[in-house]
Image (tube, coloured by chain):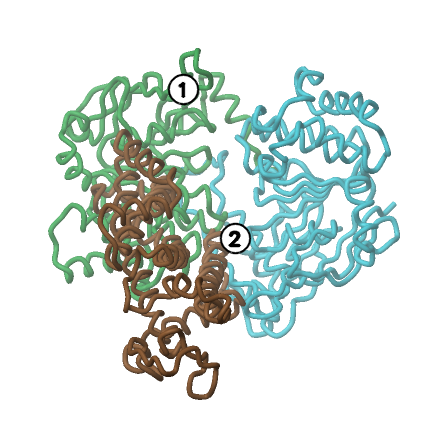
């Protein structure tokens, strides 16, 4: 894996283990080996997908890349800078360059805040901007995701699932991050709404040159959005490569099983 | 022989904004041993249809019409009589196995419940039957698992337990409401294969409800596509999917990213403009009118007539020809 | 999005809320009115008119010093309200702050705060209040402080539990991912989402505070004469039960009605707020 100046994020031999609470007093507590040695790099403007079933570690990987979890071993470098080497304050500041979209459109927005405040949160936390500037940027980014200026004064519960996910994407976009990590961004949405959001993700990449790390259990979604895909199982990448190749010519047994299990629409 | 005959079923819910029809004049027949799929997005009324058949509608809902099981209208049954039907003649499998199973009872006890209730078995007799059922649904070491609690099993295994529960009294009809949506794709395949095989072996009829077109396509003989509580397209699955004729069905199909799509993977997905309206806001005429590209004034006042486009393949739309032409040309 | 009647609509449709709200409102109104006017001066003695029976002049009669009981009851409401408001405020100010801190920091800070709360909880509340007053001295102010102090662990524990549930939610993770620090997250996200729970508890604590003050005054440790106090009235009338049992009933009823009203209000609030939380998915 070569790192060029175009590399947005480089993940190097990351391990992440959790210790579970003790079941009994006289046995050591059990450990969960969530990630067992994962390495990859994403170039600017590309989309990298991680696909796998529940429990494979992909969501944990997303949180590790975002610096929301500590690593047991290995490193995550963002634009050449190891994010865990930085002080907490430096890390907080560098967050404006990488943002996250979560799976649950209902849970990822504070039900007590208006949309304007929710979307402006990253700027509020990380940049100095006047109230007017903030408002202008909020409106700009809401328009980019297909919502209206009048939506700024509403609360999350006034929107549908698909619209809330757009709000979440707007929030992720507002600081013009170089990287957006999307953890199952469309899994909780209806089919037709899913399509709208996927199209939106494509459009935003074309317009703003965002780099994506997309986590999903849905192979078809990953195939649609991503240039490169990694198949994850039990904390490791069992196979990795350009999307077309992986789907046309899977090498690893697990990948083959996964592909074979997807129900096709015959007819 | 017609096992289940649903005739003009209408389910009305009391919402905050007044009564709203969640299912409108739905009619279909199901023969003994046949499989039917109901496909649609959330809010289309597919789950409520299943609940109406089972007599399990929520407190703020009621059903009108006829649901005939072997000749008798289930909607007329008292709660006591319906209790006799549920579990015994109709079995149901739900979406979330973790919340559908009581975490405080062993799986053996829960499977045996229906048998003790409907077949009058005692605990000892039912135990042997439970072990047989667990084996039938593919749980390894069934004798040991009888005493397991739901949290000790994996998601796939819990769903197998749910299936065992639904089948325990040998019902004539199995209703499966999104049985695999909460499961991983490899487990999903196993569970669907299991259900399909069991249905065939036991000669049961099945209604499979899903929003996943692939799941429906591979597991049922006939399909009904629902939108806004109405049936928009129906017929033999293979015929319908190879010849989608309703604008909504077509839109649904286009909106799903296909895994075996051989065209360039960066093609845009065609989306259905707009969103599903609130129940109380559904229009009187065609429920799809606000989002349809072929809509004309004729669509608005009354529901469109049902037109037969091929043997058994019916579509409720005034603009079938336009839709079919556009679809064939894509 | 499923339409719901507004918060106030549901409140007004809820029996407990309406009943409790009315009684509490009556209590507050009485206290406010008595600041400006009572039928008679509750403090001035009029020994010629002792133990008068209820009449149009003296709605509830007079006490052993000839004072109009109705006026004393009204004025006593001031004391009860003051105690309630101030002690609950003390309890909330410190308790909520400690609870939020414990929840945000976790680890040994949380342990320490929770164990300290448990320690205070172990004492029966009245005993604690008595101990505090015995240390600090008698009087209304000290009684209020004592009651405020024993309210702190209640709010600390409640806040920490509710806050923990909020910290686990995804929008908090989103705020962290956006670069917000823990203090800002606590104030901007956690606190607004637990306010409803705290308000319900506040009404309950208010009722408890009134009871506690009554108990302290009954023991002579609360408001000192001549400040009207329902609890002290109970004490004073105890020795006169054989002369005129009704004298003890009036303050007792005043306390009972106030506490009932506050509890009903708290129940109503909880019912109105909880289903909203449950239905929020």
**Judging from the image, what secondary structure is the residue with disc 2 in?**
helix
Q: Quadrant of residue A266?
A: top right
Q: Residue at x 42, y 66 (%)?
A: C237
- Chain B visual colour: cyan
**In the image, is A16 to the left or to the right of B290?**
left
Label 2: chain letter: B
Q: Quadrant of residue B297?
A: bottom right
Report the quarter where the N terminus of chain B lies. top right
Q: Is residue A102 visible?
A: no
Residue B206, position in %: x, y?
A: 74, 40
- How far separated are the C-alphas under marks 2 and 1? 43 Å
**In the image, is B230 to the left or to the right of B279?**
right
- Same subunit, labels 2 and 1: the answer reads no
Identify whether A26 is placed above or below A125. above
Identify whether C271 is placed above or below C189. below
Mark whose residue sits in front, 2 or 1: 1
The residue pinned by badge 2 equals B251
Chain letter tied to brown: C
Residue C138, position in %: x, y?
A: 25, 54
- Chain A visual colour: green
Q: Nearer the viewer, residue C99 or A4?
A: C99
Label 1: chain letter: A
């Amino acid at each position: 894996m070569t790192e060029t100046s175009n590399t947005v994020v480089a993940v190097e031999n990351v391990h992440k283990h959790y210790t579970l609470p003790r079941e009994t007093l006289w046995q050591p507590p059990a450990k969960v080996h969530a990630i067992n040695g994962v390495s990859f790099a994403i170039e600017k403007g590309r989309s990298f997908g991680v696909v796998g079933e529940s429990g494979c570690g992909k969501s944990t990987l997303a949180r590790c890349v975002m610096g929301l979890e500590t690593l047991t071993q290995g490193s995550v470098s963002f634009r050449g800078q190891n994010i865990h080497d930085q002080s907490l304050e430096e890390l907080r500041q560098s967050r404006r360059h990488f943002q996250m979209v979560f799976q649950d459109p209902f849970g990822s927005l504070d039900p007590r805040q208006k949309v304007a405040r929710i979307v402006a949160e990253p700027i509020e936390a990380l940049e100095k901007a006047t109230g007017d500037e903030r408002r202008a940027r909020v409106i700009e980014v809401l328009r980019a995701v297909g919502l209206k200026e009048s939506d700024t004064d509403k609360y999350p519960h006034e929107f549908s699932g698909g619209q809330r996910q757009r709000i979440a994407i707007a929030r992720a976009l507002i600081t013009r991050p170089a990287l957006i990590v999307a953890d199952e961004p469309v899994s909780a949405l209806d089919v037709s709404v899913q399509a709208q959001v996927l199209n939106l993700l494509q459009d935003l990449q074309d317009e703003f040159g965002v780099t994506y790390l997309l986590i999903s259990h849905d192979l078809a979604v990953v195939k649609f959005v991503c240039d490169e895909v990694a198949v994850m199982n039990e904390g490791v990448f069992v196979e990795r490569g350009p999307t077309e190749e992986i789907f046309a010519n899977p090498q690893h047994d697990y990948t083959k099983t996964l592909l074979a299990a997807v129900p096709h629409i015959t007819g | 022989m017609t096992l289940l005959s649903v005739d003009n079923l209408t389910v009305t819910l009391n919402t905050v904004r007044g009564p709203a029809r969640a299912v409108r004049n739905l009619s279909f027949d199901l023969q003994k041993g046949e499989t039917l799929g109901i496909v649609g997005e959330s809010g289309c009324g597919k789950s409520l249809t299943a609940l109406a058949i089972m007599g399990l509608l929520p407190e703020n809902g009621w059903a009108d019409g006829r649901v005939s099981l072997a000749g008798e209208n289930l909607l007329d049954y008292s709660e006591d009589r319906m209790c006799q039907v549920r579990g015994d003649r109709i079995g149901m499998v739900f979406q979330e196995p973790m919340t559908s199973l009581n975490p405080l009872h062993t799986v053996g006890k829960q499977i045996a419940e229906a048998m003790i209730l409907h077949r009058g078995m005692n605990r000892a007799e039912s135990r042997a039957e439970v072990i047989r059922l667990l084996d039938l649904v593919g749980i390894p070491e069934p004798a040991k698992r009888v005493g397991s609690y739901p949290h000790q099993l994996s998601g796939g295994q819990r769903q197998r337990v749910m299936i065992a529960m639904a089948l325990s009294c040998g019902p004539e009809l199995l209703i499966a409401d999104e049985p695999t949506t909460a499961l991983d794709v490899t487990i999903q395949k196993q569970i669907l294969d299991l259900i399909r095989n069991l249905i065939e072996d036991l000669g049961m009829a099945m209604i499979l409800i899903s929003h996943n077109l692939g799941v429906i396509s591979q597991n049922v003989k006939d399909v009904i596509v629902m939108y806004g509580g109405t049936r928009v397209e129906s017929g033999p699955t293979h015929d319908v999917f190879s010849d989608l004729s309703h604008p909504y069905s077509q839109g649904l199909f286009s909106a799903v990213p296909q895994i075996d799509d051989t065209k360039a993977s960066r093609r845009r997905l065609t989306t259905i403009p707009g969103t599903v309206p609130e129940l109380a806001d559904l229009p009187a005429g065609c429920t799809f009118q606000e989002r349809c590209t072929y809509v004309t004034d004729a669509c608005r006042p009354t529901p469109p007539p049902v037109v037969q486009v091929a043997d058994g393949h019916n579509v409720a739309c005034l603009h079938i020809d336009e839709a079919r032409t556009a679809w064939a040309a894509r | 999005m499923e339409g719901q009647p507004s918060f106030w609509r549901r409140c007004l449709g809820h029996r407990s809320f309406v009943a409790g709200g009315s009684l509490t409102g009556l209590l507050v109104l009485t206290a406010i009115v008595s600041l400006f006017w009572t039928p008679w001066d509750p403090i001035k003695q009029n020994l010629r008119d002792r133990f008068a029976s209820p009449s149009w002049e003296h709605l509830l009669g007079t006490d052993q010093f000839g004072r109009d009981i109705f006026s004393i009851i009204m004025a006593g409401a001031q004391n009860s309200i003051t105690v309630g408001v101030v002690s609950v405020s003390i309890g909330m100010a410190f308790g909520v702050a400690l609870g939020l801190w414990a929840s945000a920091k976790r680890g040994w800070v949380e342990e320490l705060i929770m164990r300290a709360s448990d320690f205070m909880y172990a004492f029966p509340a009245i005993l604690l209040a008595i101990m505090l007053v015995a240390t600090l001295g008698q009087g209304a102010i000290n009684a209020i402080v004592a009651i405020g102090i024993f309210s702190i662990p209640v709010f600390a524990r409640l806040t920490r539990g509710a806050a923990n549930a909020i910290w686990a939610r995804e929008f908090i993770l989103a705020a962290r991912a956006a670069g917000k620090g823990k203090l800002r997250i606590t104030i901007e996200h956690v606190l607004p989402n637990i306010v409803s729970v705290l308000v319900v508890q506040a009404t309950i604590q208010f009722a408890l505070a009134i009871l506690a003050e009554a108990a302290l005054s009954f023991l002579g440790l609360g408001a000192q004469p001549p400040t009207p106090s329902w609890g002290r009235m109970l004490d004073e009338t105890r020795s006169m039960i054989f002369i005129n049992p009704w004298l003890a009933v009036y303050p007792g009823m005043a306390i009972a009605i106030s506490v009932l009203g506050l509890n009903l209000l708290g129940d109503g609030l909880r019912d109105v707020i909880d289903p909203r939380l449950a239905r929020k998915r």
